[in-house]
Amino acid sequence: MAAKKPRASAPKKKAAKKLVAKRPGKPKLLAGGNPQIAKGAGDAPVEAYIAAVQGWKRDVCRRVDAIVTRSVPGLRKAVKWNSPFYGVEEKHWFLSFHCFTHYVKVAFFKGASLDPLPPGTSTQKDVRYLDIREGDTIDEALLASWIKQASKLPGLKM
């Protein structure tokens, strides 16, 4: 019996898939509608993340970003692990947020040191969360207070 020849079209299909994946376009939405955005530092990746968020969550992300931006002088921004990160020193981060199906989760990496404590607990002793759901009223003064406090604490180093 003669050996089967590999199909010539199989490698072309794989190559074609790789080319399609690299074409620019709309970011892929991951579980919960969280956009898949390439890692990057600065305003542009964070703006791309927010622009890709769908529905009411986009407005929440815009508001959180605006409050952080106006509350912290010398702010650094980046996208890591498909989430915006905010910090004041190189590779030290104090806050991030992430979209889930029914809420936007704001993470304070040293949130256990904030006064008053943000309401959401974590399995990590220092981390506290604020979950913002559709229709929730955001207490901007309290959020700004937490952000200012968090920005003065030693950040999460990564």
Image: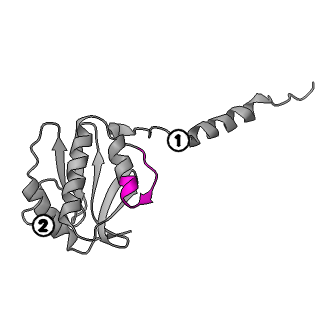
* Mark linked to residue 24: 1
Q: Is residue 117 left or right of residue 4?
A: left
Residue at 17% of width from left, 45% of height from top?
132
How busy is the neighbourhood of tag 2: few (under 14 within 10 Å), some, or many (20 plus)? some
Q: Is residue 106 left or right of residue 45?
A: left
Residue at 36% of width from left, 47% of height from top?
49
Instruction: Tell me, yes or no, if residue 128 can be seen here.
Output: no
Magenta span includes 32: no
Residue extending furthest toward the right = 1
- Percent across and percent down for residue 62 are 24, 48
Q: Which amino acid does label 1 sit on?
A: Pro
Q: For numbered disc 1, what is the local secondary structure?
A: loop
Magenta span includes 45: yes
Q: Name the residue under label 2.
A: 114
Residue extending furthest toward the top = 1
- Percent across and percent down for residue 120 are 16, 53
Q: For numbered disc 2, what is the local secondary structure?
A: loop
Quarter holding residue 2: top right
Residue at 21% of width from left, 64% of height from top?
125
- Where are the magenta residues, as a range? 36-46
Quarter holding residue 12: top right
Q: Which amino acid does label 2 sit on?
A: Leu
- Percent across and percent down for residue 1 are 93, 24
- Percent across and percent down for residue 8 are 80, 30
Quarter holding residue 17: top right
Quadrant containing the C terminus in the rendered view: bottom left
Residue at 35% of width from left, 53% of height from top?
46
Q: Is residue 36 above or below residue 124?
A: above
